[in-house]
Amino acid sequence: MFFEMTIQMRVDDFLKGRLWYIKLLQRQPDFEPHEGIAEWEIVPGSWLQLAEGTPGKDSGPLRLGVEDIETERHRLVSELDVDEFSIYTRDEVPVHWATFLDPWGNRLGLFEYKNKLEEKDRIQTVLGRRKV
């Protein structure tokens, strides 16, 4: 049985990377077990671990759910100097999605539910306020 997950992103300049991810996630790390590692619990049981090291090629993307993908794209481009990126949609896919790179070449992404009632339901489930 799986009950938690952690995904690791590597950066070759840990101090700059830590500051960049603080801006991305809009908060300080939840846990820093030792030098060269910072961790954020994105949602209960799901962790992003930032590690000093060589970024992996063609890994990811780690996609983060957001309520307004256009607003978040604007914030990333203006505050984090992320290159402008496209938002995609397909009729058969229940979300809008986008992919972008951090300054170290790690692939990240965003997604937004098209159906806002489904989005609200997912948020309540993730927060443990609704039984699955």
Image (tube, grey):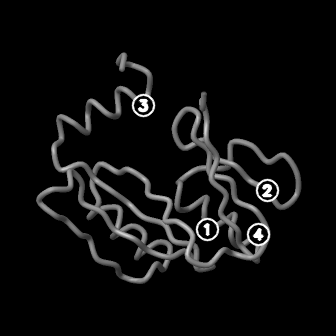
* Residue 3 vertical placement versus 43 (above, below): above
Q: Earlier in the sequence, mark 1 or mark 3?
A: 1
Q: Earlier in the sequence, mark 2 or mark 3?
A: 2
Q: Residues within 10 Å of mark 1 (few under 14, many from 20)?
A: some
Disc 1 and disc 4 in contact, CB within 8 angstroms: no
- Marks 1 and 3: which is nearer the front? 3
Residue occupying image coordinates x 70% and y 49%: 39
Q: What amino acid is labelled 1 in the image?
A: Trp
Residue occupying image coordinates x 60% and y 32%: 2
- Marks 4 and 3: which is nearer the front? 3
Q: Residues within 10 Å of mark 2 (few under 14, many from 20)?
A: some
* Residue 67 vertical placement versus 59 (above, below): above
Q: CA distance from mark 2 to mark 4?
A: 10 Å
Element under disc 3: helix
Q: Which residue is mark 4?
A: 15
From the viewer's perspective, is 23 left or right of 16? left
Q: Which residue is mark 2?
A: 37
- Could you say where residue 68 lies in the image, as x and y percent from the top left? 27, 54
Q: Earlier in the sequence, mark 2 or mark 4?
A: 4
Q: Which residue is mark 1?
A: 20
